Amino acid sequence: MNLFYKIFKPKRITLPNGKTVLERRSRLPLILFAVLIATAVAIRITGFDPVILAKRIDQFFVILRQMFPPQYNYTSKILSPLFDTIKMSLLGSAVGALLAIPAAVFSSNNITKNRLIVYANRLFLSIVRTLPTLVTALVATYVFGLGTLAGTVAIAVFTFAYVGKQLYEQIETVDMGAHEAMTALGSGKLSAFWTSISPQVMPAYLSTCLFCLEGNVRYAAILGYVGAGGLGIILNEKIGWREYDSVGMILILLFVTVAAIEMLSHVIRRKLT
Amino acid sequence: MNDAIERKLRLAPKRWYLKLTVALVFAAIIAWSSTAVDASGTDSRGLLIARGILLGLVRPNKELLLNMTKQGVAYLLLETVCIAYLGTLVGAIIAIPLAFLSSAKIVPKPVVVLGRAVTMAVRTIPAFVYGLMFIRVTGPGAFAGLLTMSMCSVGMVSKMYIEFIDDLDKKIFESLDACGCTAFQKIRYGIIPQLIPDFISTIIYRFDMNLRDATVLGLVGAGGIGAPLIFAMGAYRWSEVGAILIGLIVLILIIEFFSSRIRRKLARGL
Amino acid sequence: MIEFSHVTKIYPNGVIGLSDVTLQIAQGEFVAIIGLSGAGKSTLLRAVNKLHGISSGTLTVTGADVCALKGKALRRFRRGIGMIFQSFNLVSRTTVIKNVLAAKVPDMPFFRVLFGLYRREDKIAALTSLDKVGILDKAYSRVDQLSGGQQQRVALARTLTQHPKIILADEPVAALDPVTAKLVMDDFRRINNDMGITILVNIHHVELALEYADRIIGIRDGTIVFDGATSSVNQEVIREIYAGKAPNETEELI
């Protein structure tokens, strides 16, 4: 960005009383230009065409209309995979969140003094985080076979990376005074961490975990599409058979479940903070 | 004196039963969840495949990785970025009216409830269902992909917009009033400068997420790098999988680096 | 010239803001309004530029009948009166100069407002105001990176850019530490002396009021209980204004 100010020299403004002020050139025109170019390129590559969109948008609602009225008596067959989805996300979130704790501790530079360990851990967390959940799930189905175990693993991996990053950022913002006092009292590393750091980060950590769980329920529903268990399997099946009224019922139950979990998690999170 | 201490001790809040309940509930939930885990599909082939993937990551298919044609990783990544970019942009624009219509500060309560329900319903429909719907509109390919991405973005983006709108500092209006500004001038100089940094920050964050999620589009043939990745996996061509994954990981790391820098600048100033 | 004549303000919920206030303030005066919180200081100040309307009586400011003003005429009238707030009321996410330039917005044509295109004269005017309050070097910094005192000066510069005849200041130093508060009050005094702008300031620091203002107006339960030169204020007057309440605070201050 300094290069920008070298090319576009600041404007000199002289005040009536003789003082001068340097006004830096606005970067806005340049940014707008870049956004415009990027949009043009993206439109070319993706073949975005508002005319087609306007003309054929009614096609979008064809499937949506076929979902209503939903197939109510299909409900009984949905419940078991729906519970599978919920269980997958609960277990996956719990395992991932627990594994995230040591990873986060070794990634926070106020607790771990060895720079090498800190950066190696952070890089590891970053790389795991880049893996799209769906890809993790696919890999998991190859390694663990089709079924809920693969889905649980995929969710655990995603949760691990997400919570790990949030947690080490929280640990780094902690007030180290209490930790210092504990160390001065002669307590060991682990007990110092447990008595001084963990009470400070615990509410934020739990809140992050719950937030992650909310998203995971949604993700878990998709994972079945690649064979990783849960709702996605029957969703895929019904879409394949074009039984859209059953799809509608699945989506309605998913909506209710997600809404319920979100509300519950909101209530708990508000109590935490 | 000792009596007083003892009495105080007895008065100390007894939290152990609360803690015990929480621990028991947590343990019960985990136990209940574990019943879903079905490892019957797992066998020794899994290890072989895991080894294959790791080898593929170490020895990626260099030809595919460095190929500059339309089948190469570079072009596929560019296409994915374009899908994510335009999808985010379209979604971010759709989210603006939706957010203002679901903010308690702007519209009455019933409208808010309705607006939030719509936003949530939009969020519940999984990406590949949108993909299928849009393929009917545009045919398979990147166009359907970007529309899918935009629908997937709308929910989260508008939810975050609503929070920023609810946090608006209204005191600035009083001073603009005292300056003699009209309603339009108050919106332009009181609301917009407050919202723009947060909105842009949200859009960049969502772009980051969309780039990760864009692989889902491959499942339904809506363009991007997902489809070649899934095909390569299905055919056990691990060196190709390795090449694509390496490309994706490097791209996402680079984009994440810049997006978090820009977001930090937006939040704290230069 | 500000002229209150038998002004009464009753809020919709029945609370009496002002009752039968009559007073005159000449151009160029530095007036401090003191009193307990809730006594009507804020209402009195906000009546002047009609941020709060009055219920009865007449109020004339710079020759205009404030009660009759509305719409465009009211906005034009407000441009001649600056206002400073306790909480600065700046857009903290943008630069200092953009906040100061907001004072020019009411005079700009629509397309300039829409795109935020300011003319060179406007920028010079804004920078000159910033120079007057001594923070010219911060012109292109973001407001959220400034200290509270500096932010209040940005607000002051914004007001000066309007070229007002009167500045209304509502608890301008309540959110500042004592040293910074004095610096900001110094700015007010300088503006009052150099530019002949009438300053009407609400303040709960009696000590600061006595140090800076030429005239003190004491208000209690919406009624003016004291109005006179600063030199005529004594312990008894203060006790009268504060109705014997918060005596330790006032005694400490005098």
Image (tube, coloured by chain):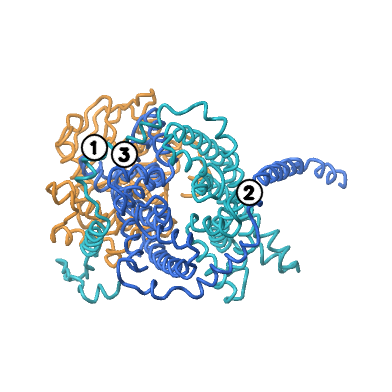
Kindly identify the amino acid type of the residue bearing the numbered disc 3: Phe
Question: Which residue is the site of mark 2?
Answer: A91
Where, quadrant-wise, is the N terminus of chain A in this rendering?
A: bottom left
Residue at the image position 26 percent from the left and 24 percent from the top: C56
Q: Residue B206: x percent and y percent?
A: 39, 53
Kindly identify the amino acid type of the residue bearing the numbered disc 1: Gln
Residue at the image position 42 percent from the left and 56 percent from the top: B215
Residue at the image position 40 percent from the left and 67 percent from the top: B251
Q: Nearer the viewer, mark 3 or mark 2?
A: 3
Chain ID at mark 3: A
Chain B as rendered: colour: blue
Q: Secondary structure at mark 1?
A: strand
Chain A as rendered: colour: cyan
Quick one: C209 or B104, which is closer to the camera?
A: B104
N-terminal of the pair, mark 3 or mark 2, is 3
Q: From mark 3 to mark 2, how far is it between C-alphas?
A: 36 Å
Q: Nearer the viewer, mark 1 or mark 3?
A: 3
Kindly identify the amino acid type of the residue bearing the numbered disc 2: Leu
Q: Residue A201: x percent and y percent?
A: 61, 56
Question: Which residue is the site of mark 3?
Answer: A60
Chain ID at mark 2: A
User: Please, is residue B227 above or below residue B180 in the view?
Assistant: below
Q: From mark 1 to mark 2, how far is it between C-alphas?
A: 75 Å
Question: Which residue is the site of mark 1?
Answer: C24
Q: Is residue B38 visible?
A: yes
User: Please, is residue C236 above or below residue A126 in the view?
Assistant: above
Q: Residue B70: x percent and y percent?
A: 30, 66
Assess whether mark 2 and mark 3 are in contact (beta carbons under 8 angstroms): no
